[in-house]
Amino acid sequence: MEKTTFDLGLAAYRAGNYTEAKACWQRCAEEEDHPTAMYNLGTLYESGRGVGRDEKAAFSWYERAAGAGLPAAMYRLARCFKQGYGTEKDDAAWSDWLFRAAAAGHAEAQFEGARHLMAHDQLPRIAEELMHQAAAQGHPGAQYEYGRICRKRGTAEGMSEAAAWYRRAAGQGDVDSMSQLGSMYEYGDGVPQNYEEAARFYAMAAERGNCFAQWKTGLFLKDGRGVGKDTARAFKLLHAAAAQHSPHARYAQHALGDAYEQGDGVAPDPAEAARWYRQAAEQGYEYAQNKLGTLYHQGKGVGQDDTAAIEWLSRAASRGLAAASFNLGIVYYEGRSVEPNDAEALRCFRKAAESGHAPALNAIGVMYGEGRGVPKNAAEAIRYYRAAADAGDLQATTNLAWSYFNGEGVARDYGKAVRGFERAAQAGIHQAVLGLAVCYRLGKGVAKDKVRARELFLRAAQMGNLEAPHFLTAKGQELRPVSELDIKSTAGDIAGSILEALFNQLSEGEYDD
């Protein structure tokens, strides 16, 4: 079959003979009004192949091809108007030709038009339909974006559909879709939870430089989740992610701060932890701001500075982080390098408690129990201790147990006290271990058992409880006789008058030595 003039031009172009291609297409355009030949001439003038680069000539040929109904030319003409290429910038003309191209089925125009409408919150149904049309034509960017649209519906069907679109885009090399699939498999959103699959997709995206995926892959490798544990590679990826100019870099910086603070995979280094937290905090990451503020209050890795602590914790709290409001309350409550401020402490605790923050509920209970910032009210203290304990706070469980032991705000009930102490002691709350030791020493709620009591006092002391050693001999081997117990020598680390009540019981002969 004899080749057409257009085909001859195409063959010449593929052979690198752009001058001959231009000559063939020029004849087609002028003699046959061939739209694709016109469009191809525009690309030659734009690229300077076979002719000198000429913006106006390129624009003119695109305009003629677009007028002849060629979708690709309509889209290219729209870009000319947007960029001022070969003509004056004209946003109205850009929009007109862009949506003409989209209506004519041009996938890139559909994708760009949909994104424009979505960015300006205009015609959401049309935007969604355009994105779907582009995705259905195989546009990977549109497949990713349409996956996001499906995921935002929040339904099981939408999540499943999102995963399907992400898979299609990932198959074409779309890195963001790989990362999203990793997230969906990690949390079981729209797909069965599968850490191995999550690790696989994260790794695919991480290899291509995706910051979010590098952070996630680093965490998976560090913890050995879904993949073999590899600390060296984990930290290499975390450092790579942390060094990127990406909004996700702060997550990796925060993760490095946590690792150095906790000694997780590296030697503990509070100063290095503070350095990484600061990098993430300065990018507005509230979790890092909370951590950095806490380090300033504790004086770990940085000089103790409650003013700096208040600044960073306030920033995090203003972003709605309940833990930061609670920690800010602790700064005001303790007042290490600033004056204690009970009113501010209570305000912060209440703010955190609004989000159901259990330690904050417990702290409000403590303030009612002590009468700090509010009139002393044992019944209110109990109400907050119960709410915090019900939310899982074991320090509140301990405080509630002491309240039952002493009959403060509730009827005395040694059985409930013992059960509370046992539950909290199993989780490592040293005040609960002390309380359980006292119960065994006195035989309250349990059979008196001096051997068990001594073991528990010693355990509490080893956990850092400052009251426990008072009940033991200097070498910590035996229980001290009642006659040697002196309330003034205690450190008073338990809220309210718990120890005072305890010593009152001892002095009243409620147990025999």
Image (cartoon, rainbow, N blue to C red):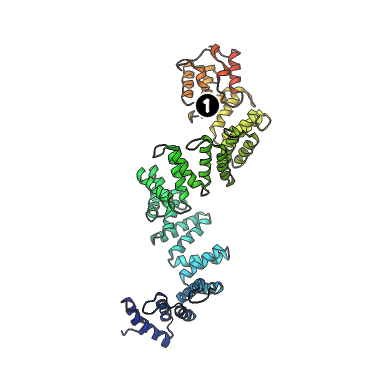
Percent coordinates x, y for residue 26 in the rendering: 40, 84
User: Quick one: quadrant of the N terminus?
Assistant: bottom left
What residue is rendered at 47% in x and 41% in y? 274
Percent coordinates x, y for residue 20 in the rendering: 34, 82
What residue is rendered at 60% in x and 33% in y? 333
Decide if residue 341 is in sight here. Answer: yes
Report which quarter residue 366 is drawn in. top right
483 or 450, which is in the foreground? Answer: 483
Decide if residue 228 is in sight here. Answer: no
Residue 43 vertical placement versus 384 (above, below): below
Report which quarter residue 309 is drawn in. top right
Residue 59 vertical placement versus 208 (above, below): below
Type of amino acid under label 1: Ala
Report which quarter residue 375 is drawn in. top right
Residue positioned most to the bottom: 31
Residue positioned most to the front: 303
Residue 89 vertical placement versus 64 (above, below): above
Percent coordinates x, y for residue 234 in the rendering: 38, 46
Q: Answer with left or right where residue 311 lies relative to residue 239.
A: right
> In terms of secondary structure, where does tag 1 sit?
helix
Q: Which residue is mark 1?
A: 432
Percent coordinates x, y for residue 170 in the rendering: 40, 59
338 or 33, which is in the foreground? Answer: 338
Q: So how many labels did they put on this image?
A: 1
Q: Answer with left or right where residue 327 lies relative to residue 44.
A: right
Residue 179 vertical placement versus 106 (above, below): above
403 or 215, which is in the foreground? Answer: 215
Q: Residues within 10 Å of mark 1 (few under 14, many from 20)?
A: many
152 or 283, which is in the foreground? Answer: 283
What residue is rendered at 53% in x and 54% in y? 154
